[in-house]
Amino acid sequence: MVSVLCSLTSVLCPLTSVLCPLACALAPLLMRLNINPNRMELIKLKKRLVLARRGHKLLKDKQDELMRNFMELFERVYKERFETEKEYSAIKKAHTLASSVMNQAEIFAATVWKKISIKFESVLKQLFNLRVPDYKIEITGEAIWWSPSYVPMELDDIFERFKNFLPRFVKLAGDEKTLRLLAEEIERTRRRVNALEYILIPNILETIKYISMRLSENERSDLVRLMKVKEIVRSH
């Protein structure tokens, strides 16, 4: 096994020494844009470079602001979710306790909310270029409309808690949806920033460098040609 590994290493080392310089030589060609090397294209590329850098700065600022809003909302949602789950567990515990006192038919008869009206509203708010939801719920009426002697106190506690729990739960759902939309927008913005920073701007810079070198070479060759023409004219 050791001899096989040694033979593979002896074969791969020469290939690596050949491929590494070749990759370094081909890297500028891969980064260069396919543009004719003339002065007009050079002017266009310089304007494009200014625009790309300005767009990169704006997207970077947007990414930072999105991250700041995301972290603030994440901390608030994390705490609110913990409190909501805690309250929901307390409601379930109270329901279990009420079920031990009343049978299911009596609980069902007592939980017919004839005097309660629930109004749900969904509004879209503008956050940067996103339209995030803002859920609201309005509960009107009294949760407890039966006689206190008809049902146990545990059921009264369930309905009072649930009436206060439902608006918090709906608000939490809207905040979590906003959090997901912010995360998706941060990912899209990050890809755009990376594309400008690591692909487009280096490609433009490499192309500007190549065109400038080609124009300098053309100017030197024209100067040499002109000097030779002058020498020929003077000799005659």
Image (tube, grey):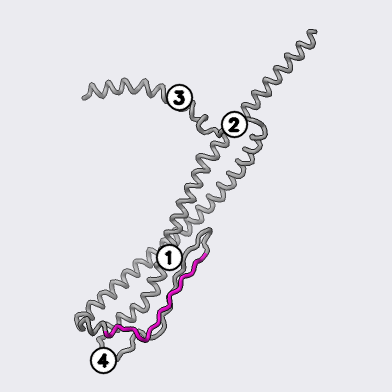
Between the C-alphas of marks 3 and 2, the distance is 20 Å
Between the C-alphas of marks 4 and 1, the distance is 40 Å
Report how many numbered discs are placed on residues in the image: 4
Which part of the image, by quadrant, shows the N terminus? Answer: top left
Q: Residue at x 38, y 24 (%)?
A: 16
Badge 2: how crowded within 10 Å, few (<14), some, or many (20+)? some
Position of residue 174 measured from the top left corner of the image (x, y, whole percent):
42, 67
Nearer to me, 225 or 80: 225
Image quadrant assignment for residue 202: top right
Element at label 1? helix
Element at label 4? loop
Please, is residue 109 above or below residue 209 in the view?
Answer: below
Residue named by callout 4: 149
Residue named by callout 3: 22
Looking at marks 4 and 1 on the same chain, the residue that comes earlier in the sequence is marked by 4
Q: Is 186 on the left or on the right of 155, as rendered?
A: right
Residue named by callout 1: 175
Between the C-alphas of marks 1 and 2, the distance is 49 Å
Looking at marks 1 and 3 on the same chain, the residue that comes earlier in the sequence is marked by 3
Q: Mark 2 belongs to which amino acid?
A: Lys
Q: Is 158 on the left or on the right of 75, as rendered?
A: left
Image quadrant assignment for residue 145: bottom left
